[in-house]
Amino acid sequence: MNAIEVENLVKKYGDFEAVKGISFNVRQGEIFAFLGPNGAGKTTTVHVLTTLLKPTAGRAIVAGHDVVKESIAVRKKIGIVFQDPSVDRELTAYENMLIHGKIYGLGGNELKEKIERLLKFVELWEFRNRPVKTFSGGMQRRLEIARSLLHEPEILFLDEPTIGLDPQTRAHIWDYIRAMKEEHNMTIFLTTHYMDEAEQLADRIAIMDHGKIIAEGTAEELKKLVGNDIIYLKLQSPKEELKCLKADFIKGCKMLPDGRIRLDVDNAAEALPKLFELAKETDVRILEVTYHRPTLNDVFLHLTGREIRDEGGEGNVAKMIMKARMRR
Ligand SMILES: Nc1ncnc2c1ncn2[C@@H]1O[C@H](COP(=O)(O)OP(=O)(O)OP(=O)(O)O)[C@@H](O)[C@H]1O
């Protein structure tokens, strides 16, 4: 059964089409990731699916309800953790939980027990009486996750759940996300520009770029789009020598702007000895060899001709933190 069904969804801001007719399904109980650079349209899609924005065209069914016609029913069944912090920094963690629970009509011992269980789940119980303004970014994000679970949503939306957090805290948050799926069979829809996050967490990934889904599948399926292993070679005088490097085991061969040669092979471990043999036979001098298995970054590069991190990935975290702070 599908938890989310989206058909030809379009969202325009004025004349600008941020989401250009995307279609996808998310199965119940799976972790589904939208992976793409900044500005790809991920947050806009989340805002439409969580009923915060009305679509310009198309249809989206979330937890069995239409996001436009039955927005209240959708809201009851979903939890959201926004990219920008939305907890009240002046209040304590406990007070934030209490107010949120009351908004959802919870109260009495039931609410108290839930707050205790959830604050323990995200390891914030001992800090429950501290004002949130004294919390680190990771603690705030954990509180947001706990808060989003209070009304036991069927589907949890996480917009860039680990943006700007250190690697250890990110790994911690990944553990919570996995636990929510495994222990509660919750459907989780997350957006990320971190390839490792999509790869580590998601059952299926949709790669988004310029408002469109350009590929969808498991990490393994997506990597198969690139081919298999990739070998990078530096040759003594590449242009001339490249002509000699032709063999059955070389599935693709491309000269890179930095002078290296990229070879696509089925299996690098088997291809490398053959490659050295071929180089010897054809009198080609190999100066340097590196190889790697395709990553999701290679997939993005293969599909778009650009690196995902060119536009705000790992190399650009400082810019993203600045952006998040400015939004606060
Ligand atoms: N309120 C708005 N008015 C006009 N344009 C907008 C608005 N919100 C977003 N956009 C534009 O729509 C495009 C998609 O933005 P969106 O925030 O959905 O992308 P994203 O993939 O989530 O990136 P990020 O992670 O930076 O939020 C961008 O070009 C952005 O500048």
Image: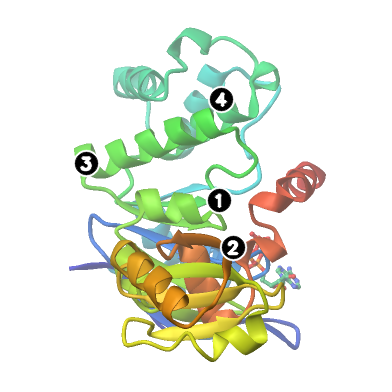
Some atom of ligand 1 lies within 8 Å of the CB belonging to the residue at label 2: yes
- Label 1 crowding class (10 Å Cα cut-off): few <14, some 14-19, many 20+? many
- Mark 4 = which residue? 139
User: Residue at point 61% right, 33% down?
Assistant: 87
Q: Earlier in the sequence, mark 3 or mark 4?
A: 4
Q: Position of residue 118 (x, y in %)?
A: 37, 25
Q: Name the quarter where the C terminus is drawn.
A: top right
Q: Look at the picture and state if 135 lies above or below 44.
A: above
Some atom of ligand 1 lies within 8 Å of the CB belonging to the residue at label 1: yes
- Mark 1 = which residue? 160
- Mark 2 = which residue? 43
- Mark 3 = which residue? 182
Q: Look at the picture and state if 8 lies above or below 64.
A: below
Q: CA distance from mark 3 to mark 2?
A: 25 Å
Quarter of the view holding residue 274: bottom left
Closer to the eye: label 2 or 1: 1
